[in-house]
Image: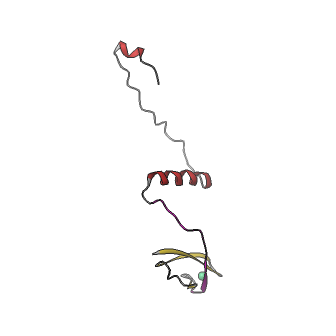
Amino acid sequence: MTTYAFRCPECGPFDARYPIGTAPDRCACPACRTASVRVITAPGITGGGNPYRRAVEQSMATADAPQVVSSLPSSGRRPVAVSANPLHRKLPRP
Ligand SMILES: [Zn+2]
């Protein structure tokens, strides 16, 4: 099943799902039953379970529609474990 875009002259755009290659040129609007023309849109390519693709899509979404927060995020810092071993003081610090 593929999602096709239609535009109702009364209600505006809506989506309908049909098997690939079987979408009609006109479809009844689900709200007002008016015959609506099919609109050609860019293909909806999704990355599925690819984590790299998901990360890219999330970063692009933040540029277009950033999420609004109602409070500051928590610091997220965990307490640093301090070693009592004196040799550890000579190790390079991060
Ligand atoms: Zn309609």
Q: Nearer the viewer, residue 70 or 37?
A: 37
Pick out the residue farthest to the front.
Answer: 21
Check the image and report above or below for 61 versus 44: above
Q: Nearer the viewer, residue 57 or 83?
A: 57
Locate residue 9, reporting x and y percent.
Answer: 65, 82
Residue occupying image coordinates x 60% and y 87%: 35
> Is residue 67 something one can see in this rendering?
no
Check the image and report above or below for 9 versus 78: below
Quarter of image, res 27: bottom right
Check the image and report above or below for 72 versus 45: above
The question of residue 43 being in magenta is answered with: yes
> Is residue 93 something one can see in this rendering?
yes
Residue occupying image coordinates x 49% and y 62%: 46
Region of the chain picked out in magenta, as a range: 33-47
Q: Would residue 42 be found to the left or right of residue 20 on screen?
A: right
The question of residue 51 being in magenta is answered with: no
Q: Main secondary structure of the magenta part?
A: loop
Residue occupying image coordinates x 38% and y 17%: 88
Q: Nearer the viewer, residue 56 or 72?
A: 56
Pick out the residue farthest to the left.
Answer: 85
Q: Would residue 86 be found to the left or right of residue 39 on screen?
A: left
Residue occupying image coordinates x 46% and y 79%: 19
Ligand 1 is found in the corner quadrant, namely bottom right
Pick out the residue farthest to the top.
Answer: 86
Locate residue 83, reporting x and y percent.
Answer: 36, 19
Quarter of image, res 25: bottom right
Pick out the residue farthest to the right.
Answer: 9
Q: How many marks?
A: 0
Locate residue 51, reporting x and y percent.
Answer: 44, 52
